[in-house]
């Protein structure tokens, strides 16, 4: 399948819309720690964010809901699923990049050019995300509840290095 050069996502999404949401806040987000593939739940504020974004999504005509397998995304997506009455589809390929030994450490210790021990390479992470998108068969308006790293890959023009991907807010593509 071809890709759109400006975003690098599968070409079929260039003719349709896609809604992205980063999970709600966790205690590790609040403390500035690298989460990666560590399965950290939402905190109370993150649950409130998830409830609020579910209300916003009621008006957009979402056709399906796909979530990362990590609980912070599943918890966010479950609020949306309950509110919209749509089934929640868990997609492990939407999970965050694994950062290996850096998980649980302050974000200041992470450098974009490094590949820490036990981490997922940039190439493997990108390939996983694109393969996952290719496997999502929805021609209408899918919602992906995922992570900042995934959203940065899909929308590099909007979230360049250092730009913060907001928690539990609607991000529309294109």
Image (tube, rainbow, N blue to C red):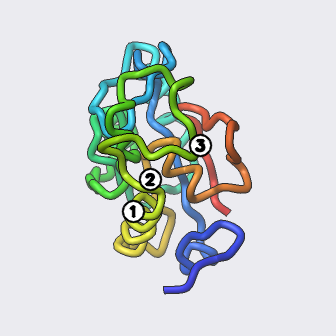
Q: What element carries label 3?
A: loop
Residue drawn at point x = 38 percent, y = 37 percent:
36
Q: Tell me which numbered mark, 3 or 1, is placed earlier along the sequence.
A: 1
Residue drawn at point x = 52 percent, y = 32 percent:
110
Characterize the local packing of mark 3: few (<14), some (14-19) or many (20 or more) Cα atoms within 10 angstroms: some
Q: Is mark 1 on a helix, strand or loop?
A: helix
Characterize the local packing of mark 2: few (<14), some (14-19) or many (20 or more) Cα atoms within 10 angstroms: many
* Residue 139 higher or lower than 97, as above or below: below
Residue drawn at point x = 36 percent, y = 23 percent:
104
Nearer-the-camera pick, 89 or 62: 89
Query: Residue 157: where, in percent of width, then height?
Result: 73, 56
Q: Mark 2 points at which residue?
A: 144
CB atoms of marks 3 and 2 within 8 Å: no
The residues tagged by marks 3 and 2 sit, at their Cα atoms, a distance apart of 10 Å
Q: Tell me which numbered mark, 3 or 2, is placed earlier along the sequence.
A: 2
Quick check: 28 left or right of 112?
left
Query: Residue 142: where, in percent of width, then height?
Result: 46, 61
The residues tagged by marks 2 and 1 sit, at their Cα atoms, a distance apart of 20 Å
Q: Is mark 2 on a helix, strand or loop?
A: strand
Q: Name the residue under label 3.
A: 170
Quadrant in which residue 13 is drawn: bottom right
Query: Residue 162: where, in percent of width, then height?
Result: 68, 37
Residue 58 in sight here? no
Residue drawn at point x = 64 percent, y = 76 percent:
4
* Residue 19 higher or lower than 126, as above or below: above
Q: Which is more foreground, mark 3 or mark 1?
A: 1
Q: Mark 1 points at which residue?
A: 124
């Amino acid at each position: 399948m071809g890709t759109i050069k400006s975003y690098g996502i599968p070409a079929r999404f260039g003719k349709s819309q896609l809604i992205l949401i980063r999970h709600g806040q966790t205690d590790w987000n609040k403390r500035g720690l690298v989460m990666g593939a560590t399965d950290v739940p939402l905190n109370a504020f993150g649950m409130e964010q998830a409830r609020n974004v579910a209300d916003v999504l009621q008006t957009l005509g979402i056709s399906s809901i796909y979530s990362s397998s990590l609980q912070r995304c599943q918890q966010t997506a479950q609020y949306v699923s309950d509110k919209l009455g749509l089934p929640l589809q868990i997609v492990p390929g939407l999970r965050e990049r694994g950062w290996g030994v850096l998980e649980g450490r302050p974000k200041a210790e992470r450098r974009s050019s490094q590949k820490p021990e036990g981490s997922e390479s940039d190439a493997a992470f990108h390939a996983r995300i694109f393969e996952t998108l290719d496997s999502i068969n929805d021609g209408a308006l899918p919602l992906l509840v995922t992570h900042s790293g995934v959203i940065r890959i899909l929308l590099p023009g909007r979230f360049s290095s250092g730009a913060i991907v907001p928690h539990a807010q609607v991000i529309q593509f294109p």
